[in-house]
Image (spheres, rainbow, N blue to C red):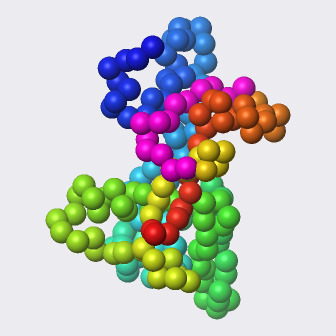
């Protein structure tokens, strides 16, 4: 059935829409969980610095102008969440740097998308920074891409469903039929 909202963009099912507030527990939302880790301004900017190779407390503090107590709290939280790894690089006095973990590196497409969104909707003129694919020098783009159909698509073609398993038991056909899509980072052509 077609609805007025289909043209407005992706439809993500509200996991609590059909639950009684007094009888059913609230289901976990992956976006909400992710925001619990990186959902404030300073955490996102610290992650941006980590991707730029700014890893030491003093360098991050100088680059962002963040209060030291806030920076210490955010770094502790990001290390605790597993997106950064704290490594000692000097013994006397003890000094540490913060490096991206595999979990942290997987945030790259999110930061690139957020940057592109800011460039498009909030910049007055040319973007302040352009990201390039190092081997060929092509500007980086973020695209939605279906690994089954082998085609790119826009957000209006996304639907959602509740997960029925951890994914291990699903076949590629089942995933394709439910509209699951993969996000790919690709160089512009």
The residue drawn where x is 35% and y is 24% is: 5
Specify the quadrant of the image occupied by residue 184: bottom right
The residue drawn where x is 42% and y is 73% is: 139
The residue drawn where x is 33% and y is 31% is: 8
User: Which residues, given as a range, are shown in magenta?
Assistant: 151-164
- Spot the residue most to the left: 124
77 or 24: nearer the viewer:
24
The residue drawn where x is 59% and y is 34% is: 179
Residue 70: tell me if it is visible: no
153 or 79: nearer the viewer:
153
Relative to 35, 116 lies left or right: left
Q: Where in the figure is residue 134, as x and y percent of width and height?
A: 53, 82
Specify the quadrant of the image occupied by residue 71: bottom left
35 or 8: nearer the viewer:
8
Q: Where in the figure is residue 167, as x and y percent of width and height?
A: 76, 37
Is the N terminus in the top left, top right, bottom left or bottom right quadrant?
top left
Q: Where in the figure is residue 156, as x and y percent of width and height?
A: 42, 36
Q: How many marks?
A: 0
Residue 29: tell me if it is visible: yes
The verdict on residue 157 being magenta is: yes
The verdict on residue 92 being magenta is: no
Relative to 185, 170 lies left or right: right
């Amino acid at each position: 059935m077609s609805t007025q909202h289909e043209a407005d963009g992706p439809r993500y099912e509200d996991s609590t829409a059909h639950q009684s507030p007094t009888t059913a527990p609230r289901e976990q939302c992956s976006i909400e969980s992710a925001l619990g880790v990186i959902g404030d301004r300073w955490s996102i900017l610290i992650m941006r610095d980590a991707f730029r190779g700014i890893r030491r407390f003093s360098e991050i503090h100088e680059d962002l102008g963040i209060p030291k107590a806030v920076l210490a709290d955010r770094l502790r939280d990001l290390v605790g969440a597993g997106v950064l790894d704290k490594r000692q690089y000097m013994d006397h006095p003890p000094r540490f740097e913060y490096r991206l973990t595999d979990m942290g590196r997987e945030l790259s497409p999110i930061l690139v998308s957020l940057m592109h969104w800011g460039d498009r909707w909030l910049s007055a003129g040319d973007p302040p920074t352009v990201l390039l694919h190092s081997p060929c020098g092509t500007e980086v783009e973020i695209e939605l891409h279906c690994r089954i159909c082998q085609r790119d698509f826009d957000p209006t073609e996304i639907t959602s469903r509740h997960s029925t398993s951890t994914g291990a038991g699903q076949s590629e056909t089942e995933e394709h039929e439910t509209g699951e899509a993969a996000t790919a980072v690709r160089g512009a052509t």
